[in-house]
Amino acid sequence: MSLAPAPATASLLAANVPALRRRDFPADFRWGCSTSAYQIEGAATLDGRAESIWDRFCTVRGNIRDGSSGAVACDHYHRWPEDLDLAAQLGIGAYRFSIAWPRILADGAGKPPNAKGLDFYSRLIDGMLARGLEPWATLYHWDLPQRLQERGGWSHRDTVDEFAEFTDVLSRRLGDRVRRWITHNEPWCSAFIGCYDGTHAPGLRDWRTALQACHHVLLSHGRAVQVLRANVPGAQVGIALSLHPNSSASASAADVAATRRYDGLRNRWFLDPLYGRGYPADIWALCGDNAPRMESSDLATIAAPTDFLGVNYYFPETIAHAPNDGPMSARVVPTPGAERTDLGWEVSPAGLLVLLERLQREYGAQQIYITENGASYEDHPAADGTIDDAKRCLYLQQHLLAVREAIERGLPVKGYFAWTLMDNFEWAEGYTRRFGLVHVDFATQQRRLKHSGAWYRSFLRE
Ligand code: FCB
């Protein structure tokens, strides 16, 4: 039994988590951390970077809880060597990051790419390789160039062509060193949170626009797969979806049907077309006239075979029938007795197992990587500077136990990336929510390893 937790968390863990050792996972299991460009880089106007939809969204009062933006964030654009050192010291072998589109095609498709932007990522990747970190590049983690939003953003079909060009430019420049590519991070959020809920950039609230945007995001994924295959021999390509296992609030026929509809939009709307089944007919019917406009080859493009599925797992959802709640007439209700993080997200390692089983059973997913998993808790640095984030330690350990169990059951989970290396700009929550293994003091930019980071390091280095 070698849990090797940070000292102050030992008692909490011993009570809850049985032995968890790295050697109980396959030797070739990938261990990593994830970040994204807008959340950490800062330097929003430097070296030719153009405006993104998040820069614009953050200027609107009320959009971001603390009125902040990613203009400075963790200043990773300047501090990346220190940050990669931290990542390497954790003992991870893989680092998932994203590339800011507005740094690369600042002036638009057909115009020369921004050399300074490309140079930045080229240096960053060399820095990863020099430290033994395998680069896992995400092409789109929500920072669409604002100039594209001006003509409709993801709801405009031309954005798909621009994304293909962006992918082409990047893969030509970086493909000699980057083998792992993730096309999109969480299309659900780009489309439905951004264009229907309006609580993420670009802040629209229109169902038809959201459905069309979603279709184009998926289509652009398929196009990017084609481009990557052509440009990068041996590329390993996937997409990272935010997926949520769900259960019905009651056994009533109404709640069960609502759960099916909710799941249809939240999970099947993405998985079905990616796995070659087209859009789920039940949800398509509910969309009526708002269903996305498609061309005849679109579904084949979306279903381009990938090498792995990225799963971002945070929480399960309990669903009840709610006639006035959105196009699915369904509502997420609290699960009785559920434990929650400080952000209110339900904690359920068992949900991860349920999800992974479903992905294999219903979709035959071959290689699954957990591309994000983590928890937001308020961290209170002690007088001596230590950060005893015992709950985050426990969260990670419980979810890793679920992953281990999944592997024991024969499910094809090949890697795990903790969200996130360091505290950062948490979208509409600004800097009020911390997910990092490393604490960031945003006034001084000082980084300090939390106990969760120390635990992950000792686990990985066992
Ligand atoms: C995910 C996002 C990631 C981060 C975590 C907490 O949905 O992909 O950027 O904000 O949630």
Image (cartoon, grey):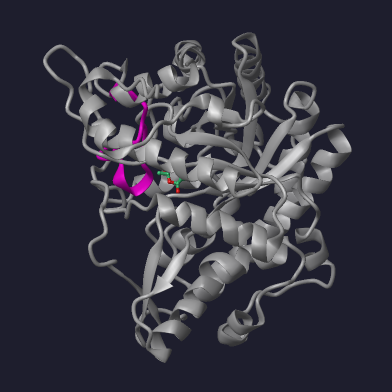
Q: In this view, does 324 lie above or below 389?
A: below
Residue 432 highlighted magenta (yes or no): yes
Tell me where residue 447 sits by quadrant: top left
Q: Residue at x 25, y 25 (%)?
A: 10
Q: Residue at x 44, y 83 (%)?
A: 256
In this view, the residue farthest toward the front is 1
Q: Is residue 329 above or below residue 33?
A: below
Can the viewer see residue 445 in this picture? Answer: yes
Q: Which residue is drawn at 71% across and 54% down?
A: 220
In this view, the residue farthest toward the bottom is 253
Can the viewer see residue 157 in this picture? Answer: no
Q: Quadrant of the N terminus?
A: top left
Tell me where residue 431 sits by quadrant: top left
Residue 2 location (% of width, % of height): 40, 21
Residue 462 location (% of width, % of height): 47, 16
Residue 221 location (% of width, % of height): 71, 52
Badge count:
0
Residue 312 highlighted magenta (yes or no): no
Question: Is 156 or 404 nearer to us in this picture?
Answer: 404
In-image side of 201 versus 164 (left or right): left
Residue 385 location (% of width, % of height): 19, 14
Question: Is 89 or 197 nearer to us in this picture?
Answer: 89
Q: Give the range drawn in magenta.
A: 424-441
